[in-house]
Amino acid sequence: MTGDREHALARRNILWAYIAVMDQPEKLLAACATASGDANDVRRAVEKAFNLTALAADAVLSMQIRRFTPRERERIEDELEELKAALA
């Protein structure tokens, strides 16, 4: 059961990160555009800009731009609500 709970908590953090960057796409692009160095530097810049874990920042950086739609955001919010209920 602990592994399931840990997985759900990690997923919740990723969903929160998705919503955060969907609310501020310009901030995400700025963090990426101003990071100097390799992919780790970009990840750290996104972590810092949005106060994310490394796992959440990696998930955000793996998102396809086509996911930045109102319908996708709604789907993410629905999943987040389901996780909140399951974790309560």
Image (cartoon, rainbow, N blue to C red):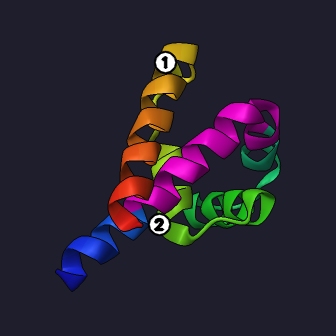
From the viewer's side, name the closer residue of 81 and 34: 81
The magenta segment: 11-29
Q: Which amino acid does label 2 sit on?
A: Leu
Instruction: Specify the quadrant that holds the C terminus.
Output: bottom left
Query: At 46% from the left edge and 29% from the top edge, which residue is drawn?
Result: 64
Name which quarter of the figure residue 70 lies in: top right
Which residue in the structure is indicated by mark 1?
A: 66
* Mark with earlier residue (2, 1): 2
**Within the magenta stretch, is there residue 22?**
yes
**Within the magenta stretch, is there residue 27?**
yes
Assign a secondary structure to mark 2.
helix
x, y percent for residue 48: 76, 66
Name which quarter of the figure residue 30 lies in: top right
Label at residue 55 = 2
Across the whole image, how many numbered discs are drawn on residues?
2
x, y percent for residue 18: 56, 43
Assign a secondary structure to mark 1.
helix
Q: Distance between the residues labelled 2 and 1?
A: 21 Å
x, y percent for residue 53: 58, 70
Secondary structure mostly seen in the magenta stretch: helix
From the viewer's side, name the closer residue of 2 and 63: 2
Q: In this view, does 86 lie to the left or right of 20?
A: left
Q: In this view, does 62 lie to the left or right of 41?
A: left
Q: In this view, does 50 lie to the left or right of 61?
A: right
Name which quarter of the figure residue 43 lies in: bottom right
Query: At 56% from the left edge and 58% from the top edge, which residue is drawn?
Result: 57
